[in-house]
Image (cartoon, coloured by chain):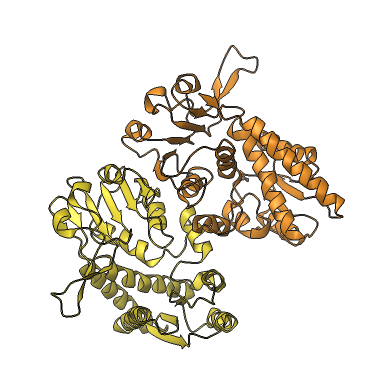
Chain colours: A orange, B yellow
Amino acid sequence: MKLMDGKAIAKQLREELAVEVTEMVAQGHRPPHLAVILVGNNAASETYVNAKVKACKDIGFESSLIQFPPEITQEMLLHAIDDLNENEDLDGFIVQLPLPNHIDDKTVIERILPSKDVDGFHPINVGKMSLGLDCFISATPGGIVELLKRYKIETEGKHCVVLGRSNIVGGPMAMLMRRNTYPGNCTVTVAHSRTKNLKEICLQADILVAAIGKPEFVTADMVKEGAVVVDVGINRVDDATRERGYRLTGDVDFKGVAEKCSYITPVPGGVGPMTIAYLLNNTMIAARKRK
Amino acid sequence: MKLMDGKAIAKQLREELAVEVTEMVAQGHRPPHLAVILVGNNAASETYVNAKVKACKDIGFESSLIQFPPEITQEMLLHAIDDLNENEDLDGFIVQLPLPNHIDDKTVIERILPSKDVDGFHPINVGKMSLGLDCFISATPGGIVELLKRYKIETEGKHCVVLGRSNIVGGPMAMLMRRNTYPGNCTVTVAHSRTKNLKEICLQADILVAAIGKPEFVTADMVKEGAVVVDVGINRVDDATRERGYRLTGDVDFKGVAEKCSYITPVPGGVGPMTIAYLLNNTMIAARKRK
């Protein structure tokens, strides 16, 4: 078994981006600039947002954190988005989800200018990805595909099973893995909560992507010998032996599955770091078009 | 084996739409209006376009056929689209594909106002379908789903295998069949030209959708006893016994497969008529929003 070390590959990707920033600046251009809108004070969202801002700084990107109180009206948030859409000093921006209940996610996301939608959540970016057109691929599936590429995982004609059908991971992963390109050209199966013969389906996977949000759900008996396993889950599990009272675990029973598979991503240190690195990558893509 | 009689169900759907048109007109509204742009004189395209225009007339829709010579510039075609986008006398329009080589399909399709894109080909409609949002579902997959619905085919937890990954059929069918609704909630596998163990994959299908463009490709040995088989193919096969020198056949070996499956669509008279009926349905959806 080989580890697909998302932390190391994310570092590599960030270093490549940092070199490009230096070149851009040397040529007299401003560095890429990402803005992040955070509404309210959800602790997890604050952690994510801070990590994104820090990641920008570390590689020489400009970043702006725009915070609004939880009671901001939808109208005001949409106005703020209009301002960012028009602001030529930034290349891309994201609105950290979830938003408070009185604000409609869909309306907000559809207000973002598609060419600045570096999260790739706007329906037009989703549609373009599905059609194989130039677009922003959202950061988690984009990061996973980048990881497979850097480990030179063979995909053509392989059977990729995606566990989970979310709009953020399962759906786009299925589309990306069936595309007529590399990585891609897989036979792709999407399984989910309504799937009856889940074990049987998983056992067919040459590449298994677990994005089902259930801690250690995928066990060794569900994995084919030599499969490539990508664990997208990040679950908190009570653990009295840890000082903070919990540990982070993926959707895969790492210990058991690691013995059977050819490649596997750890949690933490697998898909997570790739997601942030890929957001930076999307911001660079937006910045390149500016010139 | 029961036949899924697309011709009969399409007739039913058209009759329902005709009743609605009568009510609309009685209430003082104008009937739904579909415009079709045809560029050049491709014989097959002319046949399709005439069938669409005739279908409109038969149920009381207004229709406009806008023909351009093959040498029309892209610029002029885009201007024509802008006019239709702004024209409040019509509810929806389509540009018949294929277009001449000097015109870029993508540019043309993206110019269509999404709210008038009754073919559902604009990336924003594709993206919205993928995200489960309100949108125009393109006519072939939309028609197939309608057919499954009217035959009350059970889909939840079933394994749907889609043969083919085209943007027009295979891709959208996969998205629709995995949605959390009825018809939907299937485990979905997309197989295609790069799939290695195609027979084995097909044999798992409770619902098999063949959209691979190869005459009589799916044979009885590839179909599970009791499966539901949807044949999207329309292929011309040489046949000296026919006056016109060919016969139309689907992607499924109908004779052999019919004996094994629970339901099957014939070719012709299956998916084809549903496609045209569903285009009318989309035009009605657009017209309802006008009021």
The C terminus of chain A: image quadrant: bottom right
Residue A12, image quadrant? top right
A160 displayed left or right of A33? left
Which is more toward the observer, B240 or A225? B240
- Asked if residue A158 is positioned above or below residue B22 in the image, the reply reads above
User: Which residue lies most toward the top here?
Assistant: A241
Which is more toward the observer, A140 or B283? A140
Residue B199, image quadrant? top left
- The answer to whether residue A227 is seen in the rendering is yes
Q: Position of residue B236 (x, y in %)?
A: 26, 70
Question: Which residue: 40% across, 70% down?
Answer: B282
Which is more toward the observer, B29 or A86? A86
B241 displayed left or right of B199? left
- Asked if residue B289 is positioned above or below residue A261 in the image, the reply reads below
- The answer to whether residue B223 is seen in the rendering is no
Q: Position of residue A15 (x, y in %)?
A: 74, 38
Q: Position of residue A267 (x, y in %)?
A: 57, 27
Q: How many marks?
A: 0
- Asked if residue A271 is positioned above or below residue A2 in the image, the reply reads below
Q: Position of residue B63 (x, y in %)?
A: 40, 84
